[in-house]
């Protein structure tokens, strides 16, 4: 103990002093008589002395370097050392001695903690469009987006909301403001004016609310949603992401702020609700448990408009759908829109959020997994998460509707059963496509039955197979399944991806006659097609069932699905946004997340 104290240069530890206070006079005298070094250290010193004197008349070797205590280091070097430690360790370090405590009041240490430590959790709100660097690989010297000048004013003091002539909150189509190095470095210079130190920013804002950063799904009944909580300068802002207006599936996502947290005084961070049309007002955030938090608005009167509910509905309709009710002639769609307004407006931004993760990727995946915008008939555009699970791919709804709520698995793709579409002329015939898909479904059903019956029954079926009648003309149009030796994730999608059309330009594609589509601007060539099933249900998620369909892969960022029973086509386009702090810690955690969000609406 004495050796450690001498090496650190801080004297006996607190525990040693407490034990000395509990000792009696005799024990204290005996302890004081003990040598200040231990036997092992004495042996090392004696050996060093013998080696130095062994040279006799020769010149003595170099003497060992003198011991240096941490307290003997210059303060500027201690500042550099302490600034490199995790912020969670600094409070313990301040209890070592008075000098450490005094040095830890240096604002430079906390300035660097705000800028560097939280960079691992930062969410650069700038969105990269197609063709830019992949997620997580933005070069440090990348130029700031064109919206940076406007973003500076937003970060310094976020305005209530950009108001439209009708008094509604205007949705931005530009990326949310972003700043280099977490957005903190530029605004920390303004702290001296407000009297807030970098230590307060770290302890009362960044560290305190670090658990709510990331990607979340609000509990809004069947509708769900997508929230990203990010750090933007001296603010923590919750951005709600919404699909583009129906049916423009290729347009960028829209977003609006729901709440913000900022530290403008020395006391504590302030939570403000951004919902409504009267600017920021008093709100509250409570971390319920791990991976779950809730928001509450304490001034819901700020959500009301002078024109009453009718004006609120017209404003919401322009924001949500980009049109007026008179522009929507479909009576069923009008009912769905009115139902959604009544249901969602009752929450008044008092919501519970549950953490969601982006799907992990694998080299054998058919395409890069992620979030997609898809068309769902009268329900408009919805957000779907595409993930790969060995021999299957799944599309899980992040936003939903009264028929298929958020969290449910809307489509499932069988990557082991690829479908070769007929030529364009025959593809226009819906009955021809339906016959091909139903044959594949029967093949899948037989394979599942063989697996359930066991190997003995499978052998019996194989012995009887030569006597079965031959397949019809559609047999050549069905790709055989992968070899039996392939394992999940080890060649199912990869093997299929290695079989594109030799021309390299894909196969011509056209929707069969009678199949409806909300967006006629779909690609006219496709890479490949697979057998899949889609989930359909009645209103209120009644009588759900999986029906056969065709998964069409157009390119890396677009795919489609033909619902045979509904004679409907859904087009999906990738969400071109980079979400940070949204990766699953493990594949098991992602699978558990999918089960949790599905169980909430089952």
Image (spheres, rainbow, N blue to C red):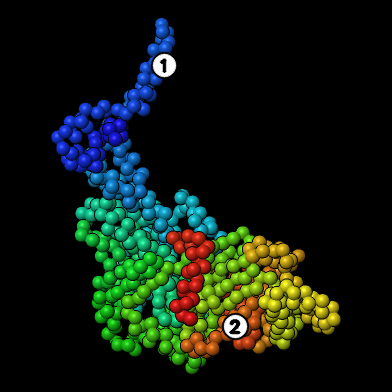
Q: Which residue is mark 1?
A: 51
Between residue 250 and residue 579, name the one nearer to us. 579
Query: Considering only vertical position in the picture, is 238 above or below 310?
Result: above
Where on the picture, by quarter, is residue 473? bottom right
Residue 186 in sight from this viewpoint: no
Tell how many labels: 2
Vertical placement of residue 246 versus 266, above or below: below
**Which residue is painted at 41% across and 6% down in the image?**
57
Q: Residues within 10 Å of mark 2 (few under 14, many from 20)?
A: some
Query: In the displayed structure, would residue 64 be above or below residue 483?
Result: above
Judged by depth in the image, the label closer to the viewer, 2 or 1, is 1
Residues 455 and 547: in front is: 455
Q: How crowded is the residue under tag 1: few (<14 C-alpha within 10 Å), some, or many (20+)?
A: few
At 47% from the left and 66% from the top, the residue drawn is: 357
Seen as rendered, the residue at the extreme right is 467
- Looking at the figure, which quarter contains the N terminus? top left
- Residue at x 35% of width, y 65% of height: 237
Identify the residue shown where x is 34% and y is 54%.
184
How far apart marks 2 and 1 lie (CA) works out to: 84 Å
Q: Secondary structure at mark 2?
A: strand
Q: Circles 2 and 1: CB distance less than 8 Å?
A: no
Front residue (pair 294, 518): 294
Which residue is situated farthest in the front direction here?
Answer: 26
Q: Residue 488 at x, y = what percent?
A: 64, 65
Q: Is residue 494 above or below residue 223?
A: above
Q: Position of residue 20 (x, y in %)?
A: 19, 38
Asked if one can make out residue 365 in the rendered structure from this viewpoint, the answer is yes
Q: Mark 2 sits on what residue?
A: 546
Q: Considering only order in the chain, which callout, 1 or 2, is on the residue closer to the N terminus?
A: 1
Q: Indicate left or right for 263 with 571 as reference.
A: left
């Amino acid at each position: 103990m004495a050796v450690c104290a001498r090496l650190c240069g801080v004297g006996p530890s607190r525990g040693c002093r407490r034990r000395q206070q509990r000792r009696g006079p005799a024990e204290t005298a005996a302890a004081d008589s003990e040598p200040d070094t231990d036997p092992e250290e004495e042996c090392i010193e004696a050996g060093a002395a013998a080696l130095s004197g062994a040279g006799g008349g020769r010149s003595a070797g170099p003497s060992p370097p003198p011991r240096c205590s941490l307290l003997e280091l210059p303060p500027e070097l201690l500042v550099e050392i302490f600034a490199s430690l995790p912020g969670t360790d600094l409070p313990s370090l301040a209890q070592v001695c008075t000098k450490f405590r005094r040095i830890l009041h240096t604002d430079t240490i906390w300035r660097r903690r705000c800028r560097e430590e939280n960079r691992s959790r930062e969410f650069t709100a700038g969105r990269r469009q197609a063709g830019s660097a992949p997620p997580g690989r933005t070069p440090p010297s990348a130029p700031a987006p064109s919206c940076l000048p406007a973003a500076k004013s937003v970060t310094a003091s976020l305005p209530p909301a950009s108001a439209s002539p009708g008094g509604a909150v205007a949705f931005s189509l530009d990326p949310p403001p972003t700043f280099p190095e977490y957005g903190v470095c530029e605004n920390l210079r303004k702290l001296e004016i407000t009297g807030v130190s970098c230590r307060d920013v770290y302890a009362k804002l960044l560290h305190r609310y670090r658990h709510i950063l990331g990607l979340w799904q609000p509990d809004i009944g069947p509708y769900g949603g997508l929230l990203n909580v990010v750090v933007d300068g001296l603010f923590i802002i919750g951005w709600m992401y919404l699909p583009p207006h129906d049916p423009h599936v290729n347009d960028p996502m829209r977003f609006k702020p729901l709440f913000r947290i900022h530290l403008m005084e020395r006391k504590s961070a302030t939570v403000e609700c951004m919902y409504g049309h009267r600017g920021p007002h008093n709100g509250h955030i409570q971390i319920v448990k791990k991976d779950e938090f809730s928001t509450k608005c304490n001034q819901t009167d700020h959500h009301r408009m002078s024109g009453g509910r009718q004006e609120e509905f017209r404003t919401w309709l322009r924001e949500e759908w980009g049109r007026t009710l008179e522009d929507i002639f479909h009576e069923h769609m009008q009912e769905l829109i009115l139902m959604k307004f009544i249901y969602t407006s009752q929450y008044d931004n008092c919501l519970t959020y549950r953490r969601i993760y982006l799907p992990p990727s694998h080299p054998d995946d058919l395409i890069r997994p992620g979030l997609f915008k898809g068309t769902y008939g009268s329900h408009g555009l919805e957000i779907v998460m595409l993930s790969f699970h060995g021999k299957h791919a799944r599309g899980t709804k992040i936003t939903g509707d009264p028929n298929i709520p958020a969290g449910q698995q809307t489509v499932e793709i069988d990557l082991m059963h690829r479908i070769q579409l007929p030529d364009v002329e025959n593809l226009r015939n819906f009955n021809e496509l339906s016959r091909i898909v139903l044959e594949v479904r029967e093949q899948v059903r037989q394979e599942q039955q063989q697996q359930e019956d066991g190997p003995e029954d499978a052998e019996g079926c194989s012995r009887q197979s030569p006597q079965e009648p031959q397949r019809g003309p559609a047999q050549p149009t069905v790709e055989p399944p992968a070899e039996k030796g392939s394992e999940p994730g080890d060649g199912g999608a990869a093997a299929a991806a290695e079989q594109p059309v030799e021309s390299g330009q894909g196969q011509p594609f056209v929707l069969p006659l009678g199949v409806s589509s909300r967006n006629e601007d779909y690609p006219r060539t496709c890479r490949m097609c697979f057998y899949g099933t889609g989930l359909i249900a009645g209103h209120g998620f009644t009588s759900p069932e999986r029906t056969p369909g065709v998964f069409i892969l157009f390119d890396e960022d677009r795919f489609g699905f033909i619902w045979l029973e509904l004679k409907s086509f859904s087009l999906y386009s990738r969400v071109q946004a980079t979400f940070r702090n949204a990766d699953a810690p493990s594949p098991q955690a992602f699978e558990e997340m999918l089960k949790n969000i599905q169980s909430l609406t089952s």
